[in-house]
C-alpha cells in the first residue's frame, strides 16, 4: 500500500497521521471540537478505542507499515481513566514503543502520546495542528519495502527491517 | 402528689399539689409583680413583691410570697386586697430606698400608686434579686458569680472581685438582670449562618437559613451554653415535643443505591475578587444574594430595602455581569443574572421609590415572558446604561456626589464615560462551579469541563447522563441554569434513574472481552491487567476466563495478551487492523 501513496510524488507533502483516541476522554474531546466548530488539520484519521489501554503496540507498527507518517495516541489524564488505570498501561507501552521505533530508525516525533480530557476540545485542535506541522517538516516516513518472500516460508523473521543510520527521508 | 383545687380572687383552679401559687395566678392571667422570678429556676422570694394573702376559709390568714408558696386543698388566695397592696408598697419603697431611680422600679411604683418613696432614693442599681447568681449556678452551671459581704454591704460579684476564669461570657446574667445592673461590656460574636448569606441568623439555636430544608432549628455548639457547661437546657424544657437532642451529632450513613443524581448546585461568585467594585470595602455595596434575602418578607428588615445605617436609598445602581463574561474571572455568561437583576430592579424600585440604574453589557432575556418583563421595566422608568461599570468609588468630584458611592461606567450608547452617584450598589454576581466539583467528579468517575461544571455524556443527545452508568446530572452543577431549567433537568434525571430501577436489569454494551481457550497459554498476564477482576484463571483447564457481567470492555487485557487469545467484541485485533488500513487507504 505504501508504494502508491498519492502525495509521495506530486504536490506538497501532506502527512498522514493515525490517531488512537480513547472513547471517554480524547474521542469525546474531538467530538467537542467538532460541535464547537473548531477547525483542525484534516491529516488525522481517528481510530476509536474504548480505552488507551486497548492500544496494542502492534497497532502503531501496523499504522507505520501501512503508510502513516505519524501516530497520535490520546487518553485520559492520569487518575481520570474511565477504567481506572488503562492510561497508565498505555504510558508504559508508549515508552517501550519509543525505544523500539528508535531502534528501527523512525524519528521519535512521529509517535506522540497526549492526555486530553473530554472538555479539552481546543487541545485536540492544537495538538493535531502542532503534530501535523511537525511531521510536515520531518517529511514522509520512508521504510524499506518488505523483502520478497524467500523460498522458505519461515525465512522472513522481521517484518520491519532497520534502516541504515541517516537513511531516513 | 394529687390535684388540688385552690381559689384565687374567687376563681377556682385545679393545680398540682405543692406547685407554687404564682404559676396558678399566671395561668389565670392575674398579673402579680415580681423582680426575682424566672420560670426555669427554683423560686427564691428575694424581691418580695409577689406577696399575696393566703386564707383557709376558717379565719386563718397570712401574707405569703406567691412565687414559692405551695398549693394545698382549699387554699384561698387574694392578690389585690388592701393588705396585699400595702405590703407590696412597703417592700417596693424599701427597694427604692437603696436604689437610684430605675425605670423598672418607677414603673412598678406608678402601678402601685407611690408618688415618692418615704425614705428617698439610694445610689445602687442592684436590687439583690439574685437572678444572676442563680442563673449562673442553676442554668449555666458556671458558678462564676455569687453574693459577697453581708447586710447593707451585700453585693453581687465574682470571687475576690477579680476577673473570673469560670465565666464563659455567655451573658445569661445580663440577660436576666431586671434592672440593668449587669451589662455585657463588649460582645464579640462572629456572624453565623450561611456563608453566602451574611444577613443570616446568629442565635445559638436557629433555623440555618430561611426556607431551609428540613426547616428545623439547629444548635450551634460553639455558642450554646449547654455545650460549654452542660447546664441550661431551657430549649429542651420549653419544647413540648421533646425534639431537642443534645446527643445528636454528624454521622455518616451508608446507603446502597443503584443510581445517583448529582445536584450539587453552584457557588455564587465572590464579589471581593473584583476589587474596583468595592465589595467588602464600602458597606453599601451588596451582592444580589444579600439583597435577595433582604427583600424577603421574613428577613431581618422585614422585606424593606435599607442601607447599613437604616435609611432607605434614593438611588440604586445594579452592576450586571460581576464574575461573568470577563476575561479576568469567568468567560462564560452565567445566564440567570440578567433576569434576576431585572427582577431586583423592579422590586427595589417598588419598595424604595428611588431611581434604579442598570449597568449591562448586553441584555439577555430569552425565554417565556422575559423580554416582555424587560419592556415593562423600560416603561416603569428603570434606567439602563449599556457598558461595563469600571469602578465604584467614594471619591466625589461634585457636591452632589459628596458622601455617596459613584459608579463610573462607559455608556456605549451615547459614547461617553459617565459618573452616576448612588446610595446603594448591587452586584449581580455570576454562578461558579462548587469549589470541590473536581473531587466530587473523581468520586463518581465523571469529568468536569474546563470551568469545573460536570460534563454530560453528550451536549445534545444525553444532557442528563454522564460517562458513568447510573450517574445523572441535574441543575446548575452541570452549568449555569435558571430554576425552570433546573426543575426540568431534575425531572429528566429522576426519570432516567427510575427507568434503571424499574427495569430491574442493566443492558451491557456488547464490547466485552473474551478469551479463546484454544490459543490461551494460561500465562495469567490478563488476570493481573484487569482493573475490575473480571478475569479468573481456571486451574482445571489451565486457561483464563472472562466474566462478561463484570467486564467493562476497556480491552487492556486484549492489548496485553501475548498469544492473541484475548479479544474484545467489536474491537478485535483483526477489526482494528482493517480499520487502520481503511483510514490510510482513503486519505
Image: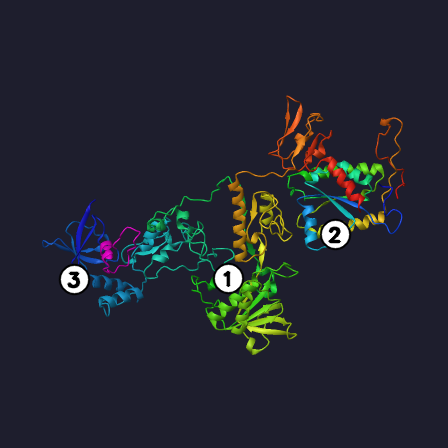
The disc label shown at residue B81, or none: 3
Chain for disc number 3:
B
Residue at image location 24% in from the left, 54% down from the top? B23
Of the 4 image quadrants, the one containing the N terminus of chain A is top right
The residue lying toward the viewer, choosing from A36 and B52, is: A36
Q: Is residue B435 magenta?
A: no
SS assignment at label 3: loop
Furthest-bottom residue in this view:
B399
Please state if B84 lies on the left or on the right of B168 as rendered: left
Residues drawn in magenta: B22-45
Report which residue position mark 2 lands on: A126
Q: Residues within 10 Å of mark 3 (few under 14, many from 20)?
A: few
SS assignment at label 2: helix
Residue at image location 47% in from the left, 42% down from the top? B251
Q: CA distance from mark 3 to mark 2?
A: 98 Å
Q: Residues within 10 Å of mark 1 (few under 14, many from 20)?
A: some
Query: Which numbered mark, 3 or 2, is in the foreground of this view?
Result: 2
Q: CA distance from mark 2 to mark 1?
A: 43 Å
Chosen colour scheme: rainbow
Of the 4 image quadrants, the one containing the C terminus of chain A is top right
Picture layout, residue A48 above or below residue B377: above
Picture layout, residue A134 above or below residue B289: above
Query: What percent of the width, then of the height, locates residue A53?
Result: 70, 38
Report which residue position mark 1 lands on: B290
The residue lying toward the viewer, choosing from B240 and B449, is: B449
Residue B38 visible to the viewer: yes
Amino acid at each position: 500500500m505504501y508504494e502508491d501513496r498519492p502525495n509521495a510524488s506530486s504536490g506538497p507533502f501532506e502527512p498522514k497521521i493515525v490517531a488512537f483516541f480513547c472513547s471517554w476522554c480524547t474521542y469525546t474531546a474531538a467530538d467537542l471540537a467538532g460541535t464547537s466548530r473548531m477547525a483542525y488539520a484534516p491529516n488525522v484519521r481517528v481510530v476509536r478505542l474504548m480505552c488507551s489501554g486497548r492500544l496494542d503496540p502492534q497497532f502503531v507498527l501496523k499504522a507505520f507499515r501501512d503508510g502513516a507518517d505519524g501516530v497520535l495516541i490520546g487518553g485520559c489524564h492520569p487518575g481520570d481513566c474511565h477504567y481506572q488505570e488503562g492510561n497508565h498501561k498505555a504510558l508504559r507501552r508508549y515508552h517501550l514503543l519509543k525505544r523500539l521505533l528508535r531502534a528501527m530508525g523512525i524519528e521519535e516525533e512521529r509517535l506522540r502520546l497526549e492526555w486530553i480530557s473530554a472538555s479539552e476540545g481546543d487541545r485536540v485542535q492544537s495538538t493535531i495542528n502542532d503534530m501535523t506541522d511537525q511531521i510536515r517538516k520531518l517529511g514522509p516516513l520512508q521504510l524499506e519495502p518488505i523483502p520478497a518472500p524467500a523460498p522458505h516460508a519461515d525465512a522472513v523473521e522481521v517484518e520491519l527491517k532497520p534502516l541504515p543510520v541517516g537513511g531516513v527521508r | 402528689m394529687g390535684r388540688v383545687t385552690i381559689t384565687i380572687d374567687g376563681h377556682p383552679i385545679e393545680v398540682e399539689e405543692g406547685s407554687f401559687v404564682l404559676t396558678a395566678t399566671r395561668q389565670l392571667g392575674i398579673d402579680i409583680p415580681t423582680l426575682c422570678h424566672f420560670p426555669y429556676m427554683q423560686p427564691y422570694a428575694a424581691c418580695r413583691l409577689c406577696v399575696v394573702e393566703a386564707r383557709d376559709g376558717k379565719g386563718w390568714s397570712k401574707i405569703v410570697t406567691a412565687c414559692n408558696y405551695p398549693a394545698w386543698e382549699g387554699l384561698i388566695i387574694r392578690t389585690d386586697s388592701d393588705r396585699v397592696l400595702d405590703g407590696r408598697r412597703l417592700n417596693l419603697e424599701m427597694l427604692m430606698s437603696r436604689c437610684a431611680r430605675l425605670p423598672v422600679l418607677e414603673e412598678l411604683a406608678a402601678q402601685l400608686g407611690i408618688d415618692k418613696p418615704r425614705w428617698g432614693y439610694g445610689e445602687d442599681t442592684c436590687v439583690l434579686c439574685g437572678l444572676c447568681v442563680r442563673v449562673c449556678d442553676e442554668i449555666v452551671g458556671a458558678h462564676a458569680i455569687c453574693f459577697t459581704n453581708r447586710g447593707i454591704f451585700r453585693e453581687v460579684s465574682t470571687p475576690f472581685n477579680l476577673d473570673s476564669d469560670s465565666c464563659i461570657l455567655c451573658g445569661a446574667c445580663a440577660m436576666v438582670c431586671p434592672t440593668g445592673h449587669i451589662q455585657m461590656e463588649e460582645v464579640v460574636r462572629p456572624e453565623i449562618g450561611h456563608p453566602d448569606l451574611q444577613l443570616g441568623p446568629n442565635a445559638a439555636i436557629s433555623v440555618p437559613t430561611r426556607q431551609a430544608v428540613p426547616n428545623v432549628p439547629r444548635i450551634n455548639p460553639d455558642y450554646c451554653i449547654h455545650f460549654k457547661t452542660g447546664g441550661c437546657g431551657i430549649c429542651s424544657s420549653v419544647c413540648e415535643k421533646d425534639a431537642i437532642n443534645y446527643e445528636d451529632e454528624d454521622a455518616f450513613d451508608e446507603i446502597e443505591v443503584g443510581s445517583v443524581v448529582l445536584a450539587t448546585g453552584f457557588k455564587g461568585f465572590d464579589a471581593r475578587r473584583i476589587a474596583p467594585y468595592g465589595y467588602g470595602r464600602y458597606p453599601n455595596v451588596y451582592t444580589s444574594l444579600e439583597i435577595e434575602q433582604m427583600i424577603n418578607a421574613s428577613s431581618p428588615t422585614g422585606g424593606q430595602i435599607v442601607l447599613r445605617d437604616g435609611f432607605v436609598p434614593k438611588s440604586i445602581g445594579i452592576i450586571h455581569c460581576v464574575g461573568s463574561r470577563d476575561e479576568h474571572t469567568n468567560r462564560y455568561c452565567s445566564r440567570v443574572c440578567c433576569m434576576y437583576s431585572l427582577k431586583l430592579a423592579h422590586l427595589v424600585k417598588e419598595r424604595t421609590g428611588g431611581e434604579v440604574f442598570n449597568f449591562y453589557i448586553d441584555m439577555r432575556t430569552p425565554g417565556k415572558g422575559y423580554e416582555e418583563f424587560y419592556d415593562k421595566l423600560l416603561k416603569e422608568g428603570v434606567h439602563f446604561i449599556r457598558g461595563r461599570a469600571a469602578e465604584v468609588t467614594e471619591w466625589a468630584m461634585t457636591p452632589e456626589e459628596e458622601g455617596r458611592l459613584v459608579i463610573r461606567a462607559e455608556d456605549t450608547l451615547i459614547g461617553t464615560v459617565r459618573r452616576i452617584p448612588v446610595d446603594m450598589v448591587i452586584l449581580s454576581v455570576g454562578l461558579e462551579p462548587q469549589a470541590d466539583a473536581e473531587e466530587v467528579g473523581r468520586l463518581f468517575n465523571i469529568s468536569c469541563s474546563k470551568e469545573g461544571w460536570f460534563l454530560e455524556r453528550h451536549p445534545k443527545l444525553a444532557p442528563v447522563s454522564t460517562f458513568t452508568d447510573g450517574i445523572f446530572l441535574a441543575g446548575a452543577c452541570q452549568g449555569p441554569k435558571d430554576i425552570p431549567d433546573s426543575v426540568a433537568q431534575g425531572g429528566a434525571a429522576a426519570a432516567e434513574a427510575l427507568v434503571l430501577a424499574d427495569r430491574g436489569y442493566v443492558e451491557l454494551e456488547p464490547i466485552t472481552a473474551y478469551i479463546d481457550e484454544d490459543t490461551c497459554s494460561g500465562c495469567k498476564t490478563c488476570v493481573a491487567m484487569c482493573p475490575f477482576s473480571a478475569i479468573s484463571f481456571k486451574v482445571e483447564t489451565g486457561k483464563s476466563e472472562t466474566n462478561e457481567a463484570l467486564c467493562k470492555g476497556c480491552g487492556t487485557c486484549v492489548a496485553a495478551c501475548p498469544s492473541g487469545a484475548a479479544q474484545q467484541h467489536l474491537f478485535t485485533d483483526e477489526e482494528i487492523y482493517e480499520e487502520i488500513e481503511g483510514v490510510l487507504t482513503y486519505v
